[in-house]
Image (cartoon, rainbow, N blue to C red):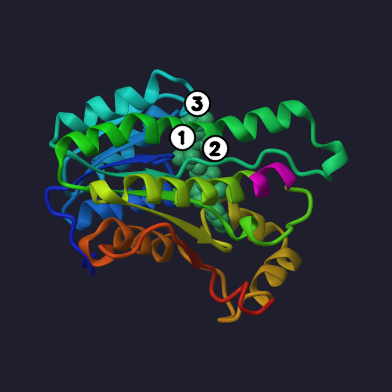
Amino acid sequence: MDAPFRLDDRVVIITGASRGIGAGTARAVSHAGGSVVLVARSGDDLAEVAASLPGQSRIVVGAVEDPAVPPQAVAAAAEMGDLWGLVNNAGISPAYAPTAETSDDDWQQILAVNLRASAAFARAALPAMVAAGKGGRVVNLSSIAAFAGLPNLVAYNATKAALDAMTRTMAVEYGPAGINVNSIAPGTITTEMVQQMMDTNPALAEKFVSKTAIGRVGTVDETAWPIVFLLSDAAGFMTGQVMLIDGGRLAAA
Ligand SMILES: NC(=O)c1ccc[n+]([C@@H]2O[C@H](COP(=O)([O-])OP(=O)(O)OC[C@H]3O[C@@H](n4cnc5c(N)ncnc54)[C@H](OP(=O)(O)O)[C@@H]3O)[C@@H](O)[C@H]2O)c1
């Protein structure tokens, strides 16, 4: 794996790093020379990802919505050096129902993981970046769902749009400290879950592909490397933006 952008000596916290885009981002950051703190609930999967990396890593096993976990991740980062980056990647969409059938419990769960936990990680990480005095990066995992009214996903869509608002606010607040904050908004990316869905439901697979300008869905690597770009010096003058990685899906709308 040749790294198009370098993150040598940079320490990055990645939430939801046990599989999917988070694990792919951990691999990409590590191959770019960075050190990573991997956060998720499945300790075995985290250990497997950590063992596959060429560089330094620490794992923090816990739920992102547990208030004890963000400070643990920041402390684990400090064992490897000054904290440079935070990737708020952990995200869920457990409810699939129209608005009138989306319960308050669904809302609470999705808000807690997708939005409040991202704010809590930022609350823990930003002071460490400011104290180190070298600037830094935050990347929030949004979605095309922030822009398109994807049916049956009202709470998920709302949390992703809110994350983008958080990105812009944090960018303005922390720009003077040299901390750039951006969102990545993927279209359909073939993580395990999405690939399984497509394998068992060819009509759905066809629907995903036909809506994408370049005629296919995206891979985890095609999402992870743009995240590395945003974490790198190459994105030094880019902040408060939402970068679409959707194969032209919204362009085609
Ligand atoms: N794949 C796509 O097509 C796509 C498209 C647009 C946006 N996105 C966004 O990209 C991000 C990653 O998606 P993905 O497809 O890679 O998801 P995924 O394969 O389902 O992986 C989710 C990751 O988050 C972790 N996680 C979930 N709930 C958690 C919690 N409460 N506490 C700690 N960790 C938790 C999971 O680990 P554990 O289960 O071990 O905790 C796992 O590592 C999400 O924010 C998603 O909304 C994905």
Residue at image location 39% in from the left, 62% down from the top: 221
Q: For the residue marked with disc 1, what is the amino acid?
A: Ala
Spot occupied by residue 13 in the image (x, y as percentages of width and height): 30, 39
Q: Which residue is labeled 2 in the image?
A: 115
- At 57% from the left and 76% from the top, the residue drawn is 248
- Marks 2 and 3, the one that precedes in the sequence: 3
Q: Nearer the viewer, residue 209 or 225?
A: 225
- Label 1, label 3: how far apart the Cα atoms are: 10 Å
Task: Give the amino acid at mark 2.
Answer: Leu
What type of secondary structure mainly makes up the magenta span? helix
Q: Which mark is residue 119?
A: 1
Look at the picture and state if 63 lies above or below 148: above
Side of 211 where 127 appears, left or right: left
Whether the residues at callouts 1 and 2 have beta carbons within 8 Å, the answer is yes
Front residue of 238/14: it is 238
What number is the disc on residue 65? 3
Q: Amino acid at mark 3?
A: Glu
Q: Is mark 3 within 8 Å of ligand 1?
A: yes
Q: Find numbered disc 3 in the image and state the secondary structure of the residue it sits on.
A: loop
Rendered view: 217 above or below 77: below
Residue 183 spot, x, y in % from top left:
45, 55
